[in-house]
Image (cartoon, coloured by chain):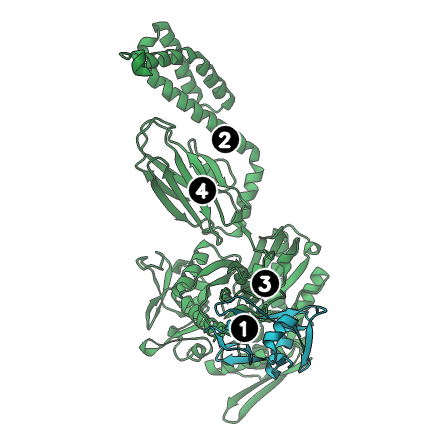
Chain colours: A green, B cyan
Amino acid sequence: MAFLQISEPNESPEPHTRRLAVGIDLGTTNSLVASIRNAVPECLPDAAGVTMLPSVVHYGERGVVTVGAEAITHRSEDALNTITSVKRFMGRSVADLRDEASARYSFTTASGDGAFTNKGTLKINTRHGAMSPMEVSADILRSLKERAEQSLGGPLYGVVITVPAYFDDAQRQATKDAAKLAGLNVLRLLNEPTAAAVAYGLEQKTEGTYLIYDLGGGTFDVSILRLTRGVFEVLATAGDTHLGGDDFDALLAKYAFDTWALTRALSPAGQANLNAASRVAKEALTTADVAQIKVDWGCGFASTADVTREKFIELTQPLLDRTMSAVKRTLRDAKLKADAIDGVVLVGGATRMLQVRAALTAHFGKPPLDTMNPDEVVALGAAIQADQLAGNAKAGDDHLLLDVIPLSLGLETMGGLVEKIIPRNSTIPVAKAQEFTTFKDGQTAMVLHVVQGERELVSDCRSLARFELRGIPSMVAGAARIRVTFQVDADGLLAVSAEETSTHVRAEVAVKPSYGLADGEIATMLQSAFASANTDMQARALAEARVDAQALVEALTKALNVDRMLLSDAEHVALALQVAHLKQLATAGDHRAIVRASEALNIASTEFAGRRMDRAVREALTGKNIEKMV
Amino acid sequence: MPVTLTQAAANHIDKYIAKRGKGIGIRLGVKTTGCSGLAYKLEYADESQPEDMVFESHGTKVLIDPKSHAVLDGTELDFQREGLNEGFKFNNPHEKARCGCGESFTV
């Protein structure tokens, strides 16, 4: 039986209309699932009351898959089949992996024959065969899905999954594919910093600039978000994929090791014991001035070491400095001073360390927002967004988050020019269509070249995809009508389709617009667009003049051949000379000269065009009398 | 007859009001929709209306409009858990039948 929940005043849902939606924080170290219950976002705990699910999957004997804390217990004795931090591998190829941390697995490269594997992406060899990172993530998601369905008492309508702001399209697509494998309906992928801002209700404000400081177990991210009329834009991100709370534990562990003057390296189990004890001490130091690192080695042996908060802060100062220099770098990238930040949001359990708060308070002149559990804040924001996307939110509360596309999307047209179809900073999802036509008589195919960037010439933009529309009926140039539609979904994935409107011949392609584009590259592309606005406009004018001239030359050359007899020899020579002149000018670089010559030729050939028209009409009427015509 | 809360229900209502950040209590009501005719309403109360009947149970305020009270008279609101699933449940002596989902009922 379904239980009832408390609603906001006057917002009790009609029976059977509430859709179950959850937000999922699919983290490198831990994952969480959250939902709106009793009108309040909450993380859903497992049977033991624990909300965090370690992002660890163990592939055991006889096809058994275990996820979470239970999987961790297999890490030391069955390392090759116990997959941790799979998020680091999402959408990556073997060649992408440079760090030694990932060398603990055996990898193969996907051949691209499976439904959910892209050619070239890596797979991890396990007892259950070669698993793609999507499949491993799907096992984590499946575990969270089960927990959510049991907690909420029914099947899930949809989920919002968070991803790091710097995730490129391949990584986002991999995350979506993982969700699909787990049988989840993805309502939206949401940037992690944006989710944290939503959890704090910052999107309810009209505008503001926020810095999100996310220090997790093993990764550090800092992002600056700007909110303008309900749209969050990521201004800059930076971070360190190998810096987290675990590194602080390790320094404490080393301190204890040195204090005890141990001479031999510890066994893996002993080291794990020491790390765990260090972690306990670190957590204690957020409230106490002194804590004890206490390790029970077994067989009646135990060691203890006292550590003061002061000592801990001193030991880990270099780590904190690294995070603060990333903070400063992000501010620089966003061209902002510290006082331009309206609020600093803390994400990740390691932000509970007092020195983190102190450093941020000192730098920004105000304390960070810390009223929410930093481990849960991303999942809670995702849950709020999921509830809205599922249609449960009250009318009028349409603070639906919008993201924007970072660079314009367009199509190559004749002359190597870019026709922008969707301008940059358009909020997504968005769909736009434009009609194009053929350039040559009898043209039956068209190559559509999809590009991204702000520049006017294709050569200065980034090529995303090329595809062909074939089977266009043979017509004179300019008669065919090709409708090209650009569609960017809420996750930033682009689909382009082209259709010849009379015959409905279609072709389409799905593109990954931001694939491989780092934020820095986006910034560079934008700057070059601003810097070269002038030369770009001239280049465009020249290319356009050339295209027009070329069309005129072709049409007249053809007409001069076909309807030679309509002209006297002198007239023919004069026109032919002018055509040749324009043809030659078109290869030179002066667009004004080309335009002038084109206009002159247009005027000079008006009489010829008139005679051709008259003759065409006469031919059409020949042998017909008035009665037949009417 | 008063409308009451079980201790568990009162505890959870207090917890959620604290999380939500405002509210003077809980409002119970009945509306005429749903597959079996009537549906329960369970909402946060931010203010009381002059005609409201107000009960207090384990220190938590319960507000009911007089029309709904005719149907809810003697009802106890409970908070239950089944496995991971949890939520509120009306124990209403007037209730004759309810649809399988428990969201709507007849008297």
Q: From this viewpoint, is residue B70 visible?
A: yes
In the figure, B99 relative to A89: above or below? Answer: below
CA distance separating discs 3 and 2:
43 Å
Quadrant of image for the C terminus of chain A: top left
Is residue A302 found left or right of A354 in the rendered image? left
How many angstroms separate mark 4 from mark 3 (CA)? 33 Å
Residues flagged by tags 4 and 2 on a common chain = yes
Which numbered disc, 3 or 1, marks the residue closer to the eye?
1
Q: Name the residue beneath numbered marker 3.
A: A196
Per the model, the C-alpha gap separating discs 4 and 2 is: 16 Å
Disc 1 is placed on an element classified as: loop
For the residue pair A176 and B32, the one nearer the viewer reads as: B32
Q: Earlier in the sequence, mark 1 or mark 2?
A: 1
Frontmost of labels 1 and 4 is: 1
Secondary structure under tag 4 reads: strand
Residue linked to disc 1: A4
Residue A451 is tagged as 4
Residue at image point 43% right, 18% down: A582
Q: Is residue A629 left or right of residue A352?
A: left
Residue A578 on image: x %, y %: 41, 13
* Chain under callout 3: A
Q: Counting residues from the N terminus, which is met first, the one under dot 3 or under dot 1?
A: 1
Name which of mark 1 and mark 4 comes first in the sequence.
1
Q: Chain of mark 4?
A: A
Tell me residue B75's x, y (percent).
59, 79
Tell me which chain the residue with mark 1 is part of.
A
